[in-house]
Amino acid sequence: MGKISPVSIKYIIHASLELTGVADRPDIIGAVFGQTEGLLGSDLELRELQKSGRIGRIDVKIETRGGRTSGEILLPSAMGKAETAIIAASLETIERVGPCDSKIKVTKIEDVRISKRNQILERAKQLLAALIIELPDSQALTQALSEDVRILEVTEYGKDRLPAGPAIETDEEIILVEGRADVVNLMRYGIKNVVAMKGARPSETVIALTKTKTVTVFVDGDRGGELIIRGLVDAGAELDFVTRAPDGKEVEELTLKEINKSMRARIAWEQIKGDFKNNNGAPIAMPRIEAEPDTDEEPQATETSARRQERPEQRSSGSSDLKSLKPMADEIVGTRGAFMLDEKFGVIGRVPVKELEETLKNLDGVHTIIMDGTVDSRLAKTAEDKDVKYIIAPSSTAKPRRTKVLTPDSL
């Protein structure tokens, strides 16, 4: 399904693909855009339709056998039936992909809304049946439901059965905390790429994770937190970033604002590992975060909603002042997501970081990217090829020449 505005998608065009030779996905997608250009007039130009969100990202599934390529093209559409049918028919006019002869045949146009209606009907039956069941006190029900949801979402990872969020295996970057209560608290605010050590001594599972993932170690704001980090390094762990809770506080009791502040203040391990090796047990140069004043109200996810109200695209101004993007950069922390903005800082779309590069290849008009992740050389090259002016990210391993990379703290 399309990545720009999946909520508005009405139809998905399914088309079979047969090639006389070998071709890659970018070749096929390029042929779809190139060979339909100018064919249907400006109102049905695929590139313009994609920019406006009327069609989603084209997906191609292929396999190669015996020197021939076959597969399926999926094209999401938010247009009406007639326009969608015309776009579908235009795919069958594509006769070549690179050096290969091609045969494309539309197999069906799927109405996504039918499946949604069926889901609604089944869910409505369940809700109707539940109405006849006597409910307990509403306050007790809310509290029990909240606790149950947290418990159900916490999974177990590896042979050591480490408490973890459901995104621990799929995300490239993870947050390593001390215990299960820390995992529950971070997941409470939607941070699901988190795993706990389950003890002061790191297990083989933890050490193996640090060698395959980009790891941020997030410890309590006490001397014990520094000892945890020393234990990890002594056991052979490969760390990327470290951060801590405010002085005297534990990760399990932090508010959303304090979690975001700690994550923004994280330090690259490369910056402090030299001092760590030579300081003979002296305290590590960990970031110092001030605790938020105690209040009677428990912060909820509505704080995130308040931040959304400050997004630049909801302001009338089209200012090029990058400082106006700070609230959005704060909001993205811990989500493993990315915003793509146009030259007036209006949001074009939001995607997971792991899908950012592929989405960017098929999208024009992106001026600025705000992401919760590391800018690597592949993403930097794609951004330069697509004439992206700015990338705002916590860290970068690349130094692009034309695209400027900034950190949220520099805004």
Image (cartoon, helix red, strand yellow):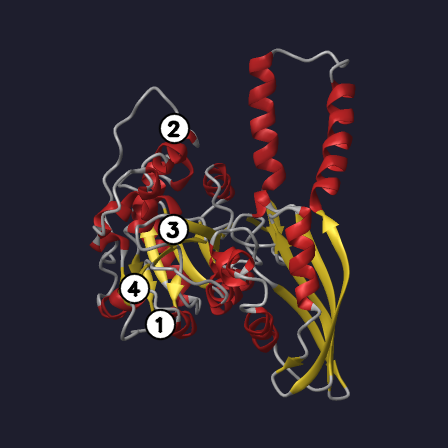
Q: Quadrant of the N terminus?
A: bottom right
Q: CA distance from mark 1 to mark 3?
A: 33 Å
Residue at 26 percent across and 41 percent down: it is 247
Residue 120 vertical position relative to residue 155 in the rendered view, above or below: above
| Residue 383 seen in this snapshot | yes
Residue 194 vertical position relative to residue 35 in the rendered view, above or below: above
Badge nearest the viewer, 1 or 3: 1
**Amino acid, disc 4:** Lys
Residue identified by numbered label 4: 389
Which secondary structure, mark 3?
strand
Q: CA distance from mark 2 to mark 3?
A: 20 Å
Instruction: Name the foreground residue: 154 vs 58.
Output: 58
Residue identified by numbered label 1: 384
Q: Earlier in the sequence, mark 4 or mark 1?
A: 1
**Amino acid, disc 2:** Pro
Q: Position of residue 295 (x, y in %)?
A: 30, 23
Q: Position of residue 401 (x, y in %)?
A: 27, 75
Kindly identify which numbered label has been placed on residue 218: 3
Q: CA distance from mark 4 to mark 1?
A: 8 Å
Residue identified by numbered label 2: 299
Q: How many marks?
A: 4
